Amino acid sequence: MPRTIEDKKAIVTELKETLSQSQLALVIDYQGLTVAEITDLRRRLRPSGTVCKVTKNTLMGIAIKDDEKWQVLSELLKGSSAFLLVKDDFSAAIKAYQDFQKASKKTEIRGGVMEGRLLQEPDVKALGDLPSKEQLMAQIAGAINALATKIAVGINEVPGSLARALQAVADQEKGGESESASDADHEKGGESEESAS
């Protein structure tokens, strides 16, 4: 059953809305995928905040026509297109797609768009090699934790270091007093020897 003009307008509106919330758009050639495989791809992408849209290139073309950020996507609109619209964690989304691609061996990535720039397959692969949001957060938390530990150890060492420094000064002063006392005794001893002679 052909889509009505109202249906097409609704699809374009939905595409525009999803694009406005996305950081990255990937275009894959999905020819040969079954409905079950598309469903599997969507399930794999969901945790990364990615939406998989299978729609006509003409409708996506209308959705991006007035949006400078996405206009360059028009260069990828050919053949059977599925659009992976990544809202949040693009590294995790690309890895999820790559896992799906290895399992299905049916799709290929045509390219993508990020921040108004056209990305080729090697660019997309490089983005996928970056740490995921969770990994970055864990690394930052680890760095903060290590810094906090160093600060705590440093703060705990200050009283001990101060006490050792004070003790050294006190010992030095006592040593100085002992030396002057022994010098005084030595001088007195010398005087008594002289008076005896």
Image (spheres, rainbow, N blue to C red):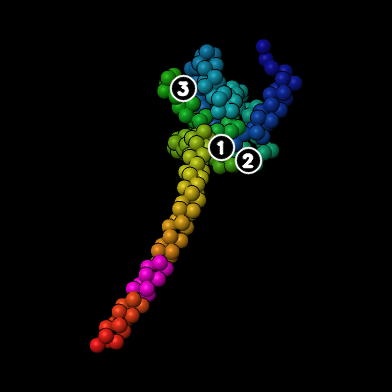
Counting every numbered tag in the picture gives: 3
Q: Earlier in the sequence, mark 3 or mark 1?
A: 3
Residue 33 place in picture, x, y as percent: 50, 17
Kind of residue indicated by mark 1: Val
Task: Name the dominant secondary structure of the magenta segment.
Answer: helix
View extreme (front): residue = 196
Q: Is disc 2 surrounded by few (<14), some (14 to 19) or many (20+) residues within 10 Å?
A: some
Q: Quadrant of the C terminus?
A: bottom left
Kind of residue indicated by mark 3: Phe
Residue 133 place in picture, x, y as percent: 53, 35
Res. 73 image quadrant: top right
Q: Is disc 3 surrounded by few (<14), some (14 to 19) or many (20+) residues within 10 Å?
A: many
Label 1 element class: strand
Say whether marks 3 and 1 touch (CB < 8 Å). Answer: no
Res. 77 image quadrant: top right
Spatial distance from mark 3 to mark 2, Cα to Cα? 28 Å
Q: Tell me which residue sits at (41%, 23%) in the image.
A: 102
Label 2 element class: loop
Say whether marks 2 and 1 touch (CB < 8 Å). Answer: yes
Which residue position is annotated with label 2? Answer: 69
Residue nearest the observer in this picture, 126 or 34: 126
Q: Earlier in the sequence, mark 3 or mark 2?
A: 2
Relative horizontal placement of residue 78, taking residue 164 as reference (left or right): right
Relative horizontal placement of residue 194, taking residue 46 as reference (left or right): left
Q: Tell me which residue sits at (42%, 68%) in the image.
A: 173
Q: Please give the range of residues in magenta.
A: 173-182
The relative height of residue 110 versus residue 68 in the rendered view (above or below) is above
Q: Tell me which residue sits at (60%, 32%) in the image.
A: 87
Residue 158 place in picture, x, y as percent: 48, 54
Which residue position is annotated with label 1? Answer: 113
